[in-house]
Amino acid sequence: MLSIGIVKETIAGERRVAITPDVVPRLRRAGLRVLVEAGAGAAAWFPDSAYGEAGAEITGADELYGGAEILACVDRPRTDRLRAGRFLIGLLHPDAAYTGELAAAQVTAASLDRVPRTLSAAQAMDALTSQENVAGYRAAVLAAHTYERFFPLLVTAAGTAPPARVLVLGAGVAGLSAIGTARRLGAVVTGYDIRPEARAEIASLGAAVLDLGGEGAGEGGYARTLSEHEQQAQRDELGRQVARHDIVITTARVPGGRPPLLVTETGLKDMRPGSVVIDLACGNVETSRPEETLVTGNGVTVIGAGNLPATMPAAASTAYAHNVCAFLEHVLRDGVPALDRTDEIQAAVIITGGAA
C-alpha cells in the first residue's frame, strides 16, 4: 500500500493544509495509507486528533518526507526535502527554475493551478477556481470591515446612511464571488470586464455592468493581453469611474503574464477620503504591494491581498482537499498512480516526470 503524506506548510502566512480530516476516509478507500505531519492542520483549526480519528497516522517531518510516496501540499515545498521517485501534488505555480529543481530531484509533480477550466471532467479538480472563490468572498468581507461606513442603505431615527458604491474590476471567479458577496452585504455594485461573456455574468448577479467598449476575450476563457494603446485608454476611463466609488476590488490577471495596471496613482488621488481599494492580483493598482496595507495622502486605504485564501484557511483547505482527492481518484489505479500524458488533464498539470 502506498502512502500519501500531508505536509505542514512553511511559508510565512500560509495557514492552509492540503488535506482535511473529512477526506481521509476517501483517500483510504482509494487504497492509500494517510500520513499527516504533526501540526499540519493546526493553523486551519484541524487538530492532529481529528486526523487520527479519521484514520490517518501522525508523523514527524523526516518520517513523512522519507516514507510517503505521494506528497500533498498547498505551496511549493523545498526541493532538497524531496526524494527521487516521489509524486508531488500542490499549487506549485511553476516557473522554469522550480521546474528544473524538481526535474533534477527526479520528482514527478502535478500543479493543480494548471487544471484546464474548460473541461467539464476537470471541474472537481479545479483548485484555482475553488481558491479564487474564497478570495473573492474574503475580499468583499475585508472591504466591508475596512470601510468605516455602512455597506447597506440604512434608514434610522438618526438619519439615512447611503449604501456603499462598490466597483469590481475583473469578473472571473474571484470577481464574481466578490460581486455576489458585496451585493448580499447590501452595497450598490458595478462590475467591469473586457470579455462579453463575463459582462453577461455580472448582469446575471444583479450588478450594474460598466461597459467601456472594446473586446478582450482570449483563449481558455481568460482575457487577452491588450495593446499598450488599449491599456492606456482603459486606464484613463477607469480613472474617471474609480473616483465615483467608495470601494474598488481588482481581480484581473493574465495567465503567464503580469497583471494589467488598471488603477493608477492619479486615479487613487481622485477618490474620496475613507475609500478602500483591494488588489487581489497585486499589480492592478499602481501603489499596491503584496500583503501590505497603505493609506494614501488623501486617505484611501490600499490593500495588496495576494493570498486571501490563507486568511480563511478552514474553508479554503476544505475546498482544496476535495480538489486534491478528485485528482488522485483520476490518476490512481488500484492505489497506484497511473500517469498518462495522453490524458488531457494530466498533460496540463504534470510539469515533471510522468509517462510520455
Image (cartoon, rainbow, N blue to C red):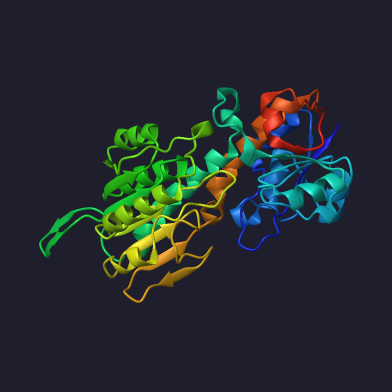
Residue sitting farthest toward the front: 229
Picture layout, residue 336 above or below residue 211: above
Asked whether, in this view, residue 233 is left or right of residue 80, the answer is left
Picture layout, residue 302 above or below residue 180: below
Asked whether, in this view, residue 191 is left or right of residue 294, the answer is left
Residue 28 placement: quadrant: top right
Measuring from the top left, give residue 272's x and y in whole percent: 26, 67
Residue sitting farthest toward the bottom: 297
Residue 101 in view, yes or no: yes
Closer to us: 218 or 73? 218
State the quadrant of the N terminus.
Answer: top right
Picture layout, residue 20 above or below residue 340: below
State the quadrant of the C terminus.
Answer: top right
Measuring from the top left, give residue 2's x and y in whole percent: 84, 34
Asked whether, in this view, residue 354 is left or right of residue 120, the answer is right
Asked whether, in this view, residue 281 is left or right of residue 269, the answer is right
Residue 22 in view, yes or no: no
Count of number-bearing discs: 0
Residue shown at 49% from the left, 37% from the top: 222
Residue shown at 35% from the left, 51% from the top: 233
Residue shown at 57% from the left, 41% from the top: 128
Closer to us: 40 or 349? 349
Closer to us: 69 or 105? 105
Measuring from the top left, give residue 121's x and y in whole percent: 59, 23
Measuring from the top left, give residue 149's x and y in whole percent: 26, 63
Residue shown at 48% from the left, 54% from the top: 280
Picture layout, residue 165 above or below residue 54: below
